[in-house]
Image (spheres, rainbow, N blue to C red):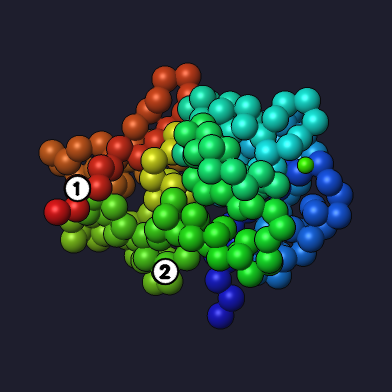
Amino acid sequence: MKASSSVTTKPLVLVVEDEGPLVTMLRYNLEKAGYRVVAAVDGQEALTLLAEECPDLVLLDWMLPQTSGLEVCRQIRRRSETRNVPVVMLTARAEEADRVRGLETGADDYITKPFSPAELIARVRAVLRRATPTLEDETLSRGGLIMDLVRHRVTRAGRPIELGPTEFRLLRHFLAKPERVFAREQLLDAVWGRDTYVEERTVDVHIRRLRKALNGPGEADIIRTVRSAGYALALEEPVAG
Ligand code: CA
């Protein structure tokens, strides 16, 4: 049985690099390792693609024309909708001070050129695993909510929840990136697909249904409405002891 593509979507990596041959090499190796790739040649294009494509990770070259990779990273961290996207910086500079600067700006990891494809993939995998620990699992869970992606079953505090297919995809999208705020437009792209024409109000309708299904009497609302931004999960993970 083939799982529906919306449930098993391959992680999307945004490559930001102005050197063509390196982009080709990165794309080849990332795709071979099971990732989807979009590429930008400068910071401006990167920020546009970030908003449009909602990548799971950004591979960001330090040396870019116009806006430097460092500045792009800073802008990624400044915007609420991209704040939690993991960033791996690529650089020819091996100095410790640069590494620290990169990490202080908000990069999650750092790869020094030249690097081997194996190292690249290992780093990308590790950063993605840390950022979305459940991305490749068959079960997503958070704060008492459990989503079994294989059996298409959802429970909250042990209570079975019935969800329609759209609500199921919405919830899956939230749970895969539990810290993020999603704009309506991003939810439309991710859940309905880019090619369908659906009004943003439709998102509100399905969020309402999702809330109604998830929130039992006396239970806290699982979905947070973020004014003028969109929606986010309101489930806190208990602090591990
Ligand atoms: Ca470059």
Apparent side of residue 27 relative to residue 5 in the rendered image (left or right): right
Q: Which quadrant is the N terminus positioned in?
A: bottom right
- Of tags 1 and 2, the one toward the viewer is 1
Q: Tell me where residue 47 appears, x and y as whole percent.
A: 67, 31
Of all residues shown, which one is farthest toward the right? Answer: 20
Question: At numbered mark 2, what does the secondary structure look like: helix, strand or loop?
Answer: loop
Q: Going 35% across and 40% down the picture, which residue do you hit?
A: 233
Q: Which residue is at 48% across, 27% downward? A: 80
Q: Nearest the camera: 110 or 152?
A: 110
Report the disc number at residue 138: 2
In the picture, the quarter occupied by the C terminus is bottom left
Instruction: List x then y, in percent, for residue 113.
Output: 70, 54
- Give whichever of discs 1 and 2 has the lower sequence position: 2
Is residue 129 placed above or below 97 in the rendered structure?
Answer: below
**For the residue labelled by badge 1, is the local secondary structure a helix, a strand or a loop?**
loop
Q: In this view, does 10 lie above or below 43?
A: below
Q: Could you tell me the amino acid type at mark 1?
A: Val
Residue drawn at (55%, 60%), measured in percent from left and top? Answer: 123
- x and y percentages locating residue 198 in the rendered image: 63, 37
Q: Name the residue under label 1.
A: 239
Q: Considering depth in this image, is 110 or 180 the residue closer to the camera?
A: 110
Let me know if residue 177 appears in the view.
yes
Q: Quadrant of residue 64?
A: top right
